[in-house]
Image: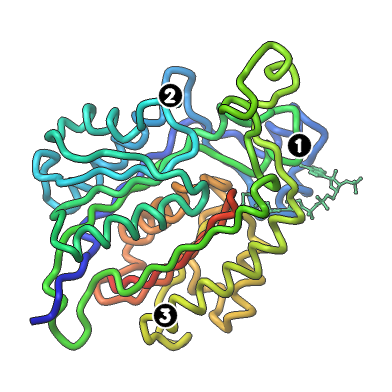
Amino acid sequence: MTPPRSRILGTGRFLPDGVRTNDDLAKMVETSDAWITERTGIKERRVAAPGTVTSDMAAAAGRAALEAAGVSASELSMIIVGTVTPDVPMPATAVFVQQKLGAERIPAFDVSAACAGFLYALSIADQFIRAGQARYVLVVGVELLSRVLDWGDRATCVLFGDGAGAVLLGPTSGEGARPSGVLSTRLYADGSLAEALIIPGGGTREPLDARALDEKRNKVHMSGQEIFKVAVKNLTAATAEAMAASGLAAGEVDWVVAHQANMRILTQVASRLDVPLERFVLNIERYGNTSSASIPIALDEAVRDGRVREGHNLIMCALGAGISWGGAAVRF
Ligand code: ACO
């Protein structure tokens, strides 16, 4: 008998209503719509309203994924949330999601892998389902980055946005010539680049005090060029590896659902892989970089508008702070 594998049964997303355009940012820092568009491909991003917390967005995306799959929250066996912008340092955002969804007393935990958080969470969920230890696992990627950005730092504040995306993963028999499901996942990290993208304050290394707050140590600090170079190299390798691990040639990939960090990164990855950019699901123009939420948001958009259909071969890849990165192949 073929061992069980996991399959995406439903997708969902939540984007806050508040839109911040490049022109809005040009009123806050020395930048311009032309610079941001040319260097990143971003035109606008979403910013959550003051009362909204991360778990609100995660629960909304999760609810949509459950509804799409026709599965109720009480049937969940696990909730995994990829985020680096939790509601509180302790406990996990996933337990607030559990409460808000009305799920049973199931395992609920967060995964901290920044922009690769969704792929890390997807991979963990896949292992539990393959091992027969879980049935329905809700995998959420969510970020409320607007709260941890220095809105006076033009090198970072123009890049990011808020949002949440979710998939419901469940078991499938894995039988048949072209079974749907998660075909492969591969995860990586290289801590030697940990300082290149970091929120340095607020943990045990630099507990927050008045000086730290004054120096914005609780906000995102980034060495953009360093990240850019390693992103192109490692995303290309992760995507090529996901194709090889699942036996897919470039021509058999229907969609690349990549982390949306920078249009120039995606263009370079596409050309190195020989997969045309038309086969990448793109929404960076409207949402910016939503970190761990970007893949599930892009996937949900493409599923709901009919681009991604049953039987399509998808490659997912992401890289972010850590640096952490990975790739996955999924037959939808
Ligand atoms: N508006 C106008 N000018 C700016 C802005 C801005 N928003 N930001 C930086 N500049 C200036 C710089 O100060 C610099 O000026 P100088 O030449 O007078 O010193 C000039 O523009 C060029 O700066 P660079 O940093 O060389 O610009 P670059 O082309 O590398 O683009 C960017 C910067 C967009 C941050 C790019 O490096 C990048 O996208 N890196 C990847 C970072 C990333 O995506 N991080 C997200 C998390 S990781 C991930 O998701 C992959």
SS class, disc 3: loop
SS class, disc 2: loop
Residue 72 rendering spot, x and y as whole percentages: 11, 43
- On screen, 176 above or below 30? below
Residue shown at 15%/30% (left/top)? Answer: 102
Q: Which residue bears the numbered disc 3?
A: 253
- On screen, 296 above or below 23? below
Residue shown at 34%/37% (left/top)? Answer: 58
For marks 1 and 3 on the same chain, the one whose residue lies earlier in the sequence: 1
- The furthest residue to the right: 30
Residue type for callout 3 = Val
- On screen, 141 above or below 235? above
Mark 3 is surrounded, within 10 Å at the Cα level, by few (under 14), some (14 to 19) or many (20 or more) other residues, namely some
14 lies left or right of 277: left
Residue 87 rendering spot, x and y as whole percentages: 42, 26
Measured in 3D between alpha carbons, the distance from the residue under mark 3 to the one under mark 2, in whole angstroms, is 39 Å
23 lies left or right of 177: right
Where the C terminus falls, by quadrant?
bottom left
Q: Are marks 1 and 3 in contact (CB under 8 Å)?
A: no
Residue 205 in view of the camera: yes
Q: Which residue bears the numbered disc 2?
A: 88
Looking at the picture, tell me which residue is in the foreground, 244 or 27. 244
